[in-house]
């Protein structure tokens, strides 16, 4: 993402995992680590995806350390695609190495949003979460787990009105039984072409709002 990005290789459940870490120039009080998951490994998803980089930039500009990583079988990460099961274990391994304690934010795009939601389900309530951001969540393709009601104020679900990869109706069908708000961007498709600055602004606004929520 920038010249200061630190490359790491950490042990994962299926072998080495490739990780990229971006740190804020001026960490803010209350800031921590945001772990961000990328789109589907079999359809070109990597830690360098533009939406993933936008999510990382949004967190870094709010004083958070952003951690992106390649799921198993992507880039220099060992292993092969595991339909979300192993990818969840990859995310938890990255979290264990980079965010074992302190404030934690989770974010993901598309398939990565599915994995991030699964991580939320696995971690909560034992591990406190500062914020959850799910963008273009793959609700039509995977069994996206619900978000605990007590996390709704800390959760931001963003979807494009004209998403042709994951229909907006599928995300609404997932969110409706939970009474979970969904932020819909008019005229936007799956990859948020031309609207990445807006996506960054919405995420930053959410992070500031979460900072004001009493623990």
Image (tube, rainbow, N blue to C red):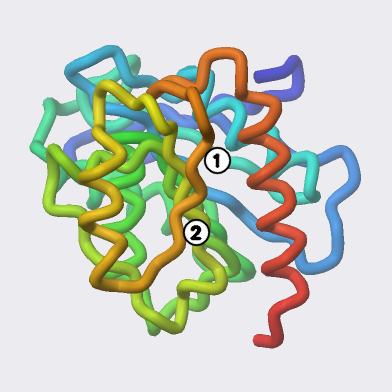
Instruction: Answer few, some or many: residues within 10 Å of disc 2's Cα (few below 14, many 20 plus, some between 14 and 19).
Output: many
Instruction: From the image, tell me which residue sits under label 2.
Output: 132
How far apart are the two marked residues, 1 and 2, measured between alpha carbons?
Answer: 14 Å
Tell me which residue sits at (30%, 39%) in the image: 168
The correct choice, above or below, for 147 with respect to 34 in the image is: below
Please tell me in which quadrant of the rendered image residue 53 appears: top right
Tell me which residue sits at (33%, 39%) in the image: 112
The correct choice, above or below, for 195 with respect to 167 in the image is: above
Q: Nearer the viewer, mark 1 or mark 2?
A: 2
Quadrant of image for the C terminus:
bottom right
Quadrant of image for the N terminus:
top right
**Left or right: 180, with 198 as reference point:** left
Q: Secondary structure at mark 2?
A: strand
Instruction: From the image, tell me which residue sits under label 1.
Output: 67
Horizontal and vertical percent position of residue 177: 24, 71
Please tell me in which quadrant of the rendered image residue 58 appears: top right
Q: Nearer the viewer, residue 109 or 153?
A: 153
Q: Secondary structure at mark 1?
A: strand
Tell me which residue sits at (60%, 14%) in the image: 194
The correct choice, above or below, for 140 with respect to 63 in the image is: above
Extreme residue in the right direction: 26
The correct choice, above or below, for 78 with respect to 44 in the image is: below
**Left or right: 63, with 41 as reference point:** right
**Left or right: 78, with 186 as reference point:** left
Sooner in the amino-acid sequence: mark 1 or mark 2: 1
Horizontal and vertical percent position of residue 121: 28, 69
Tell me which residue sits at (25%, 34%) in the image: 167
Q: Nearer the viewer, residue 128 or 113?
A: 113
Q: Which mark is residue 153?
A: none
């Amino acid at each position: 993402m920038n010249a200061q990005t630190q490359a790491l290789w950490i042990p994962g459940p299926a072998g080495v995992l490739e990780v990229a870490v971006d740190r804020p120039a001026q960490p803010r009080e209350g800031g921590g680590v945001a772990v961000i998951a990328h789109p589907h490994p079999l359809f070109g998803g990597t830690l360098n995806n533009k939406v993933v980089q936008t999510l990382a930039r949004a967190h870094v500009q709010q004083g958070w350390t952003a951690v992106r990583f390649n799921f198993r079988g992507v880039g220099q990460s060992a292993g092969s695609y595991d339909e979300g099961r192993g990818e969840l274990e990859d995310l938890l391994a990255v979290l264990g190495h980079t965010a074992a304690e302190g404030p934690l934010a989770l974010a993901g795009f598309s398939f990565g949003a599915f994995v991030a939601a699964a991580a939320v389900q696995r971690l909560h309530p034992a591990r406190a979460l500062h914020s959850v951001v799910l963008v273009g969540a793959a609700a039509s393709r995977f069994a996206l787990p619900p978000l605990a009601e007590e996390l709704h104020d800390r959760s931001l679900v963003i979807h494009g009105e004209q998403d042709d990869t994951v229909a907006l109706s599928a995300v609404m069908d997932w969110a409706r039984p939970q009474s979970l708000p969904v932020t819909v961007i008019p005229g936007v498709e799956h990859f948020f072409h031309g609207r990445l600055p807006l996506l960054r602004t919405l995420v930053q606004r959410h992070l500031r709002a979460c900072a004001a929520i009493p623990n």
